[in-house]
């Protein structure tokens, strides 16, 4: 039964049997490998799905936006309505978030300024005259929250070019205006009286 019979030489029949047996073995191996891959593949995605999610990643959209000029209020304050010539005069810039959401406002030293002038508008003194130091100040302001910057003015007048020494401001009526970038406050009046 194992001896090949037919018109062809026996070697041809043996080669055909070897090819057929090899094909059957290869098919069995492929079917077994496919079954193992199928069984192993079904558990792998489930294991991956069972992993806990990672921590949330912060995105730029979560950062508070910059405050718009429309949402800000700038006020100039004076410690008292009247001072004697020679006294130090306490003044403040008060910046308030008047909007309905938190925002970040750049109020670095070169963007804010207090300017003293006469009621007629003549320049008397500025906190930025002869001053060039910048700072990095960008506070987060909640709705209604304010930031205050206090300044002590000696009463000495100043000029923007720093070349003149105009002396001390005499007795009289003055006003101070606060500025933050392009935002200006309303003038706040005060008076200097002659020293007794």
Image (tube, rainbow, N blue to C red):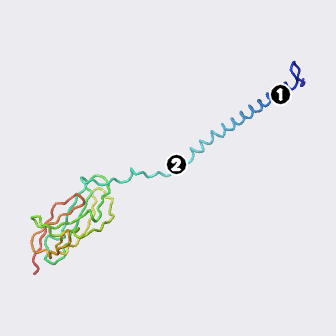
In percent of width and height, residue 67 lies at 29, 54
| Residue at left offset 30%, top offset 52% | 101
- Residue placed farthest to the bottom in the image? 196
- Residue placed farthest to the top in the image? 7
| Residue at left offset 32%, top offset 63% | 137
Instruction: Answer few, some or many: residues within 10 Å of disc 2's Cα (few below 14, many 20 plus, some between 14 and 19).
Output: few
Q: Quadrant of residue 131?
A: bottom left
In percent of width and height, residue 165 lies at 17, 75
Instruction: Answer few, some or many: residues within 10 Å of disc 1's Cα (few below 14, many 20 plus, some between 14 and 19).
Output: few
Q: Secondary structure at mark 1?
A: helix
Q: Secondary structure at mark 2?
A: loop
Q: Is residue 20 above or below residue 47?
A: above
Residue named by callout 1? 15
| Cα distance in 3D space between marks 1 and 2 | 59 Å
| Residue at left offset 30%, top offset 63% | 108
Q: Quick check: marks 1 and 2 in contact, CB under 8 Å?
A: no
Residue named by callout 2? 53
In percent of width and height, residue 88 lies at 19, 76
In percent of width and height, residue 93 lies at 23, 65
The image quadrant where one finds the N terminus is top right
Q: Is residue 50 above or below residue 81?
A: above
Q: Earlier in the sequence, mark 1 or mark 2?
A: 1
Depth check, mark 1 against mark 2: the one in front is: 1
Q: Is residue 29 above or below residue 141?
A: above
Image side of residue 171 versus residue 102, left or right: left
| Residue at left offset 54%, top offset 49% | 52
Image side of residue 47 versus residue 123, left or right: right
């Amino acid at each position: 039964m194992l001896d090949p019979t037919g018109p062809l030489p026996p070697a041809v029949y043996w080669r055909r049997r070897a090819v057929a047996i090899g094909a059957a073995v290869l098919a069995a191996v492929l079917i077994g490998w496919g079954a193992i891959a199928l069984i192993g593949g079904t558990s792998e995605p489930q294991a991956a799905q069972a992993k806990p999610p990672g921590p949330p990643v912060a995105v730029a959209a979560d950062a508070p936006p910059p405050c718009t000029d429309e949402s800000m209020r700038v006020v100039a304050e004076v410690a008292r309505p009247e001072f004697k010539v020679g006294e130090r005069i306490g003044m403040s810039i008060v910046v308030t978030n008047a909007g309905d959401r938190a925002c970040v406002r750049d109020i670095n030293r070169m963007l804010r300024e207090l300017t003293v002038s006469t009621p007629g508008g003549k320049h008397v003194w500025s906190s930025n005259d002869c001053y060039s130091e910048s700072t990095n100040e960008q506070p987060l302001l909640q709705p209604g929250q304010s930031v205050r910057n206090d300044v002590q003015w000696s009463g000495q007048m100043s000029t923007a070019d720093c070349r003149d020494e105009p002396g001390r401001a005499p007795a009289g009526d003055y006003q101070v205006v606060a500025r933050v970038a392009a935002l200006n406050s309303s003038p706040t009046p005060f008076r200097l009286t002659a020293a007794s």
